[in-house]
Amino acid sequence: MIVSIRKADYLGEYRINFQFSDGTEKAVDFGEFLKKTKNPMTKKYQDKKLFQSYSIEYGDIVWNDYEMCFPIWDLHEGEI
């Protein structure tokens, strides 16, 4: 079964609640990931305004034309 993201709601700080095509719902905290990243293209998303600028494209969450994205199944499992 192919799982996709149906909806993503910003919860505050660096948390996003995902609703997936299989009915699963999961809140994921990206804070620790962003805190530890060394990549400047990713590090800039520590700015909460930029972090909130995500979109859902083809069932995936992306920031700025795939500048930052994550495997859907990892998000489904609540891991990044």
Image: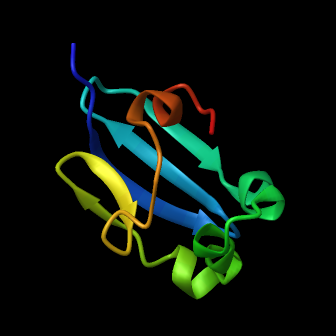
For the point 44% across and 37% down, the residue is: 71
Check the picture and name the quadrant holding the C terminus. top right
Pinpoint residue 69: horizontal percent, then vertical percent: 44, 54
Left of 45 or right of it: where is 18?
A: left
Q: Where residue 38 sits: x, y (%)?
A: 76, 64
Name the residue nearer the viewer: 15 or 55. 55
Residue 61: image location, x then y, percent: 36, 54
Q: Is residue 52 above or below residue 78?
A: below
Residue furthest front as drawn: 39
- Return the residue nearer the eye: 34 or 19: 34
At which x and y percent is residue 41? 58, 73
61 on left or right of 37 = left
In the image, taking residue 80 as reference, residue 31 lies left or right, namely: right
Q: Compared with residue 14, is residue 46 higher up or lower down, i.e. above or below?
A: below
Q: Quadrant of the N terminus?
A: top left
The outermost residue toward the left is 58
